[in-house]
Image (tube, helix red, strand yellow):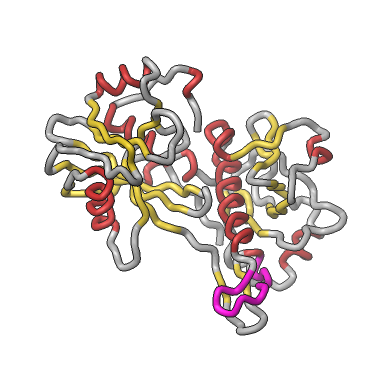
């Protein structure tokens, strides 16, 4: 069964940059013990290489190469079959191979090793989906090499989507950490933005935080905003989601109404919080007084949804 790609009508936020995909991940095929042997024998199979979070990109497209003669390596991951004709034909199997560092020899036909942040907005749906999927699962493999129960080294199985412990038989699966991100609006239709203590420069974005165990998304929205800004919000409304594989988050976008406007930074996570009208935000950004979340982020989408259009940044400040 082929899984259709999501359309732009999936949420009020539309199809976000890192939520685009044209890949059937083929979960039904992962269980085959001879999966990699079978698809390696197929001359149409292609490999996506990833090294230090960077993939080979040429002409705003991923460079997908033929399988190496030596095989796929120790921890290949089956990314799925393509759902559109792009630089490879529809139905092409794609395998992720992770390298310890970029291999200049793979770029002999041209291209550069680029991070997802650098190129996501220039990639098509197929390549964006492959890159996000590859980055997330590669990050999981990098930090889950041993069993959390007994400490024994684990063995990749099921196309690279399971790690099994040979000592106690337990199976471990890729994790995703849900985080809420919120456009807080007051009665004057202003938006509340904050500057995190960990950020360099005068950068502002929507408030966000991880969902805690046993907590609903709506409760997380109310708690996180109150903790970071002292503002109590109500009627949180879900708008859409986007994976954020830095390293393993799923950002769940909300808007919420402010019950009070006495905003104050907590001094721990946030160094400052400010209310902005549309005119104030446009002026602060255009003058370089502040920078805002980059174009691949759900935060930027939330801000521009409230703003009513694209916010123009000085070229030097535009970034992911």
Q: Position of residue 225 (x, y in %)?
A: 25, 47
- Residue at image location 50% in from the left, 29% down from the top: 319
Span colored in magenta? 146-159
Compared to 111, does 7 lie above or below?
below
In depth, the one of 107 and 142 nearer the eye is 142
Left or right placement of residue 309 versus residue 199 in this view: left
In depth, the one of 140 and 87 nearer the eye is 140
- Residue at image location 23% in from the left, 31% down from the top: 275
| Quarter residue 80 falls in | bottom right
Left or right placement of residue 137 versus residue 183 in this view: right
Q: Residue furthest front?
A: 267
Q: Residue furthest bottom?
A: 168
Compared to 295, does 45 lie above or below?
below
- Residue at image location 54% in from the left, 40% down from the top: 125
| Quarter residue 137 falls in | bottom right
| Quadrant in which the N terminus appears | bottom right
User: Dominant secondary structure of the magenta stretch?
Assistant: loop
């Amino acid at each position: 069964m082929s899984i259709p790609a999501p359309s732009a009508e999936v949420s009020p936020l539309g199809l976000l940059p890192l939520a685009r995909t044209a890949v059937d991940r083929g979960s039904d095929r992962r269980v085959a013990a001879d999966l990699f042997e079978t698809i390696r024998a197929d001359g149409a199979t292609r490999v996506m290489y990833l090294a230090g979070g960077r993939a080979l990109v040429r002409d705003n497209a991923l460079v997908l190469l033929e399988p190496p003669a030596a095989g796929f390596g120790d921890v290949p991951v089956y990314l799925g079959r393509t759902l559109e004709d792009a630089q490879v034909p529809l139905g092409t199997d794609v395998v992720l191979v992770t390298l310890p560092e970029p291999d200049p020899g793979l770029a002999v036909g041209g291209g550069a090793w680029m991070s997802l942040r650098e190129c996501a907005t220039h990639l098509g749906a197929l390549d964006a989906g492959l890159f996000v999927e590859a980055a997330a699962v590669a990050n999981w493999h990098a930090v889950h090499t041993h069993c959390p129960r007994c400490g024994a080294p684990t063995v990749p199985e099921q196309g690279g989507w399971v790690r099994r412990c040979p000592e106690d038989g337990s199976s471990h699966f890729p994790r995703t950490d849900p985080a809420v991100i919120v456009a807080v609006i007051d009665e004057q239709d202003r938006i509340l933005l904050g500057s995190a203590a960990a950020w360099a420069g005068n950068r502002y974005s929507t408030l966000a935080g991880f969902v805690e165990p046993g907590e609903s998304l709506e409760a997380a929205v109310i708690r996180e905003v109150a903790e970071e800004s002292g503002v109590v919000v109500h009627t949180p409304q879900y708008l859409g989601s986007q994976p954020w594989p830095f390293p393993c988050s799923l950002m769940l976008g909300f808007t919420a109404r402010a019950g009070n406007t006495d905003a104050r930074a907590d001094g721990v996570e946030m160094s400052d919080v400010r209310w902005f009208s549309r005119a104030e935000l446009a002026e602060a950004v255009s003058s370089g007084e502040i920078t805002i979340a980059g174009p691949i982020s759900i935060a930027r989408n939330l801000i521009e949804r409230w703003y009513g259009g694209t916010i123009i940044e000085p070229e030097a400040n535009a970034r992911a």
